[in-house]
Amino acid sequence: MTDRSANASAVTNRSATTTDLGTPIPTPWVPRWGFHRHNELLNGRMAMLGFVALVAVEWVLGHGILIWP
């Protein structure tokens, strides 16, 4: 038989990157540059804001922004 206290101490001494069963917990990899989820969300939101602003300007002027009378 195994001693429960010895087993419990072995579990508590493991690193934080493994579960109680010993399976590894993957750590997320975050790139330092390039396409991030946050950057892409911000870029998409700014594009939507710009599109809505363009439609509002065209509605106020009564004509397209490229077709200047």
Image (cartoon, helix red, strand yellow):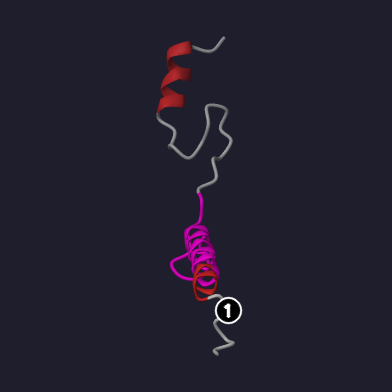
Q: Quadrant of the N terminus?
A: top right
Q: Can you tell which quarter of the image residue 44 is in? A: bottom right
Residue 67: where, in percent of width, then height?
59, 87
Q: Residue at x 41, y 22 (%)?
A: 9
Please say whether residue 38 is one of the residues in the magenta stretch.
Answer: yes
Q: Which residue is mark 1?
A: 63
In the rendered image, the residue lying farthest to the bottom is 69
Mark 1 residue type: His
Q: Residue at x 55, y 75 (%)?
A: 62
Which stretch appears magenta? 28-55
Which residue is at the front of the view, 47 or 26? Answer: 47
Please say whether residue 2 is one of the residues in the magenta stretch.
Answer: no
Q: Quadrant of the C terminus?
A: bottom right
Which residue is at the front of the view, 69 or 50? Answer: 69
Which residue is at the front of the view, 50 or 15? Answer: 50
In this picture, is 24 found above or below 10?
below
